[in-house]
Image (cartoon, grey):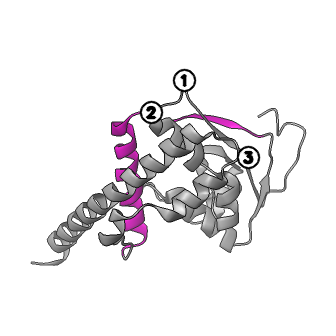
Amino acid sequence: MTALENQTFGEEYRVTGHIDVFSINKKMKAFECYESISAFNQLQNLKDGFLVTANLLVRAKLFKRVVLFDEHPFSGGDKEWTRSATALGHKIKYVPNSIVNHPARSTWPEMTQKLRRTTGGKITIFPDYKISAFRSFFPPIEAASHIIKHKNSNLRVKTLVFLVAYRIQALLIFFINKKRAIHTRAYMREHLP
C-alpha cells in the first residue's frame, strides 16, 4: 500500500502492479521455476485486456458498477470482470512499485490443482475451448518462445520451465476432455427428461 499512499486516482481507475512470484527454497524446484516465468505476468495481461486480482485495487463504487464478479468454483472470473470494466471505459493505472508477493506452487499436486481450476474456468467461460490431442505430442512452441525471451533466468531454469510446460500441455488434454464430459452430463441431467 505504501506505493499508492501519495497517489490519487479517479473513481474510474483500476490500479494494478507487479506480482512477484517467490520460492521459499534456496534453489527453486521445477514447478517453482515454471511459476516464476509463467504466472501472473500483469504487464502482459494488461496488453491482453485483462488483469488478475492478485494485485488489483478497485474502489467499491466501481466494483459495483461493473457486472457482478462470477465466483463460480473454477477460475477466470477476474478476467471476465476486468474485461467488462474495460468495455465500460474504466481505465487501468499500472504502478510498478505496487508489488504483491505470491508464493510459487512447488509440487505436482499443487500444479494439477491449479490446472483443474483454470481449465475448468476456460471451459465454463469458453465452452468451445479445445486443445488437439495430436498437438500434445509436440513441444510447446509458443511457451518455448516466451521462455527463451525471459531475461532474468539461467539455462537450468529455462530448461526446467520448458519440461514442465511440455508435461502440462500433455495433461491439459486429459483435463479438458474430463471437464467437458462432466459439463455435458450436468447439462443433460438438467435439461433432458
Q: Which residue is mark 1?
A: 24
Q: Secondary structure at mark 3?
A: loop
Q: Which residues are magenta?
A: 98-127
**Callout 2 environment at 10 Å: few (<14), some (14 to 19), or many (20+)?**
some
Q: Which residue is mark 2?
A: 106
Residue at image point 31% right, 71% down? 134
Question: Do the numbered discs 1 and 2 sit on residues whose CB atoms are within 8 Å?
Answer: yes
**Callout 1 environment at 10 Å: few (<14), some (14 to 19), or many (20+)?**
few
Name the one closer to the observer, 112 or 89. Answer: 112
Instruction: Say whether residue 152 is visible.
Output: yes
The answer for how far apart the CA atoms under marks 1 and 3 are is: 22 Å
Disc number lying in front (2 or 3) = 2
Task: Identify the image quadrant of residue 135.
Answer: bottom left
Q: Secondary structure at mark 2?
A: loop
Task: Identify the image quadrant of residue 187.
Answer: bottom left
Name the one closer to the observer, 6 or 113. Answer: 113
Instruction: Say whether residue 69 is visible.
Output: no
The numbered disc on residue 17 is 3
Q: Secondary structure at mark 1?
A: loop
Residue at image point 51% right, 44% down? 159
Question: Do the numbered discs 2 and 3 sit on residues whose CB atoms are within 8 Å?
Answer: no
- In terms of sequence position, does the residue under pointer 1 or pointer 3 come before the other? 3
The answer for how far apart the CA atoms under marks 1 and 2 are is: 9 Å
Kind of residue sitting beneath label 2: Ser
- In terms of sequence position, does the residue under pointer 2 or pointer 3 come before the other? 3
Question: Does residue 8 appear left or right of residue 174 in this picture?
Answer: right
Which residue is farthest top?
26
Q: Say above or below: 185 vs 13.
A: below
Please tell me whether residue 100 belongs to the stretch shown in magenta: yes
Name the one closer to the observer, 48 or 31. Answer: 31
